[in-house]
Amino acid sequence: MKTPLELLLRGVATIACTLALLVAPIAPAAAGQNCEARRPSVESMKKDLALAASVALQLDELAAKEGARVLVIARAGQNLAEYGLRWSHLGIAYRDESALDGRGAWRVVHKLNQCGSDRSMLYRQGLAEFFSDGLYTHEAGIAVLSAELAARLLPQLRNDALLARLHEPRYNMLAYPWSGPYQQSNQWALETLALLADPGVNSRAEARAWLRAHDYRPQTIRVPAVKRLGARIATAHIAFDDHPFDRRMAGQIDTVTVESVFTFLQRAQFASAPRVLRAQPLPPPLRLERAAVEQGPAERRS
């Protein structure tokens, strides 16, 4: 007899094979990481999918108890402890009530760097795909948006053209938040939140002005000169030429981190305090199979 987790893995694998026939394949990209020719272990796949299934059910409970409909969601794709960071990547998650024949499911819109290049694309994915990206730690960070802001954002999150309005394909993992030609993943999510929150925001410059007016504060990461030089030479997705010269020479790199976004949203009263979700004991197989299906179509948008 198949275990519940084996049923979950089988369900996800079946859906993934079907989707491969229906949509253009999505490159296995990790935000701010180079592509590696590696095959994920069965154990890591189990942990990824168990986390996705558990998070889906926990978010359903939040929706039922607290009315949560839109939230920012983070994952830890790499170890950033030396920079004082827990999370590496942020997306905007929302409850799609029309999915699964009206049963509803969670979708995540986010931006990914394409295999360590200097280019990026936007994606709409289910939770299984969002968390199946080589996690460093199997936990999720969330901040539930206020009911008022969520009501404003929810209908707009289905509009592909609107979500792409502030997307800058030129990717820099350490992009400067207040000027410059680049945009990193967390920065796109933050600027897009400004766009969706205020009808008066229609450009990146206006989004930046809105964020300044609402007291967003980027996080300063210390990057020594040797690391800056090595990163710039060895990788296409890291640049420092958009940062103020004096701060760059001092090794002070200001950028958009998940932590800074969580802090900003709570301080501005746009969202609740951030929470950490971990894999919980999984329910019976029938609900597990439902959670597997909730990974949703891998819709690619550019």
Image (spheres, rainbow, N blue to C red):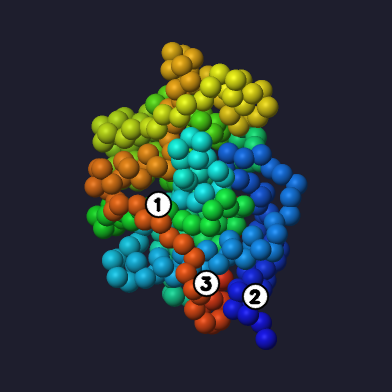
What's the residue type where badge 2 is placed? Glu
Q: Which residue is rendered at x = 66% and y = 63% of the image?
A: 43
Comes first in the chain, label 1 or label 3 = 1
User: Quadrant where the C terminus lies?
Assistant: top right
Q: For numbered disc 3, what is the local secondary structure?
A: helix
How many labels sit on residues? 3
Question: Neighbour class for label 3 at 10 Å: few (<14), some, many (≥20)?
Answer: many
Report the residue marked by disc 1: 72
Q: For numbered disc 2, what is the local secondary structure?
A: helix
- The image quarter containing residue 5 is bottom right
Q: What is the distance, in whole Å, between disc 3 and disc 2 at their CAs?
A: 13 Å
The x, y position of residue 193, in whole percent, is 37, 44
Q: Which residue is rendered at x = 70% and y = 59% of the image?
A: 41
What's the residue type where badge 3 is placed? Ala
Q: What is the distance, in whole Å, between disc 2 and disc 1 at their CAs?
A: 29 Å
Question: Neighbour class for label 1 at 10 Å: few (<14), some, many (≥20)?
Answer: many
Say if mark 3 contacts mark 2, CB within 8 Å: no
Q: Is residue 243 left or right of residue 227?
A: left
Q: Which numbered tag is attached to residue 6?
A: 2
Question: Neighbour class for label 2 at 10 Å: few (<14), some, many (≥20)?
Answer: some
Comes first in the chain, label 3 or label 2 = 2
Which residue ends up furthest to the front in the rendered image?
82
Residue 61 is at least partly visible in this image: yes
Q: Which numbered tag is attached to residue 291?
A: 3
Residue 166 is at least partly visible in this image: no
Comes first in the chain, label 2 or label 1 = 2
Does 219 sit above or below residue 295? above
